[in-house]
Structure formats: structure tokens, C-alpha cells
Amino acid sequence: MAMHLAPAIPEFEEAFSSFARGTVIATSEGPVAIEDLVPGMEALTAEGRTEQIIWIGSMTHYPSRASIGLEASKLTRITAEAFGVGRPTPDLMLGNRAHLLLRDSRCHRITGAEAAYAPAASFIDGVSIIEVTPAAPITVFNVVLRRHGSLRAAGLEIESYHPGSTIPDRMEPQLSAQLLDMFPQFRSFAEFGPVAFPRMTGEEVEQVLLG
């Protein structure tokens, strides 16, 4: 397994920080824990497709007390049935860059689509969806599919990794090349293909749900 040193900036963290260790993913072979997935396996997506897993990345978050000046990592715990019966079941722990697929006609006003990816952290209410600061090291993962889509985990739909279509314009060329180097399957960001659904910011999610 290749090891990479990467700067602690959002564009790099997003490549790893969606699923906490122990998350069970729906695959053609049945439910499989995220840490047991290997490239070549096929995931059952929320779009009704079977997509090959072509890359899995992971990183370990350490408690802030482990090192002076280390910023505390934040995870999002979604308690059982926070979004309705079986959504999720059981509790689901997600990394700080996870995005849920929000199927709501009100998304159209913001994105022009009937569904969109929303930051999991934007749903934190302190009751059924809470922010968690791990007291011990925890490994988080992300997955690249042959065609971008939504992984099924504990009854929820979570975005697989995609760097976004504008990332070369948002990053310095050296950093952009360093990020792309983590994905030996691709020669350019264009090879990731289109994003399955638009993405919303936390502020846009609030406008959709409360506006």
C-alpha cells in the first residue's frame, strides 16, 4: 500500500475523511466493513448501479492531547434512525468531510437538481446528530468508484470521493499535481468524470431546509 505525506488542507483531507473505521458498505459480495474493502470489489450504489472500487485511501486522526498544537479532529455521529426508520441503523460515524445525498425537491432552487450532496456536519443538531471529538486515534477512509456515485452505508447514501471539477483552478499547480499523484489510475482530474450530483455548502443546506 502506497504511503503519501500530504498537507493538512481541506482539498487533501477530503480524499480520506468520509467513513470512520467500522462503517459497513453495501457491496455485490454483501455488507463489508470499510477497512476490509479492496480495489476491484464492486459497491452497490444508491443510484442503483454496481460500480467497481478503484481506490481506497485512509488516514488516522489523533486526539489533540497527543501532540502540542495538534488541532482536535471532529467526526459526525448520526444516531440510529435520525433520518427516519432504518436511516441509519445502527449509529453511523462519519469523517469531517463526508457528504450525504439529500433527496429533496427544494434542492432544485439552489442547485437546479432534485438531489444534492450536503455536508454531514451541516445536519448536526446536538441531539440525534452530534459532533464527536475522538478520545483515541481513529482511522477514516474514502473510496473512489470507477464512476462517481453514492455508497450505501447503514441505510444512508454517502458520496464517494471526487475532487470536483474546479479543483485545478482552486489550487496552486504544485499542490494540484501533488493531489493528483495520490491517484495513479488518473493522468488528469478530468478522468474522474462528472460528479453524480451537485454539492451544497452548509449555508445552502440551511437555506433548503429552513428557507
Image (cartoon, rainbow, N blue to C red):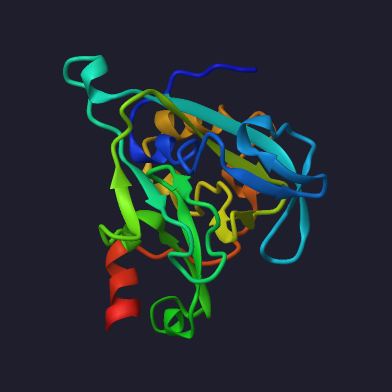
* The N terminus lies in quadrant: top right
Q: Nearer the viewer, residue 109 or 37?
A: 37
Q: Is residue 32 above or below residue 160?
A: above
Q: Nearer the viewer, residue 74 or 2?
A: 74
Q: Is 155 left, or right, of 38 in this rendering?
A: left
Name the quadrant containing residue 39.
top right
Q: Nearer the viewer, residue 150 or 167?
A: 150
* The C terminus lies in quadrant: bottom left
Q: Is residue 149 above or below residue 1?
A: below
Q: Which residue is at 23% across, 24% downward? A: 64
Q: Which residue is at 48% across, 85% downward? A: 105
Q: Is residue 46 above or below residue 143?
A: below
Q: Is 189 left, or right, of 49 in this rendering?
A: left
Q: Which residue is at 38% across, 78% downward? A: 110
Q: Position of residue 54 (x, y in %)?
A: 72, 38
Name the quadrant containing residue 85.
bottom right
Q: Position of residue 25 (x, y in %)?
A: 65, 47
Q: Which residue is at 34% across, 62% downward? A: 123
Q: Position of residue 121 (x, y in %)?
A: 34, 54
Q: Which residue is farthest left? A: 69
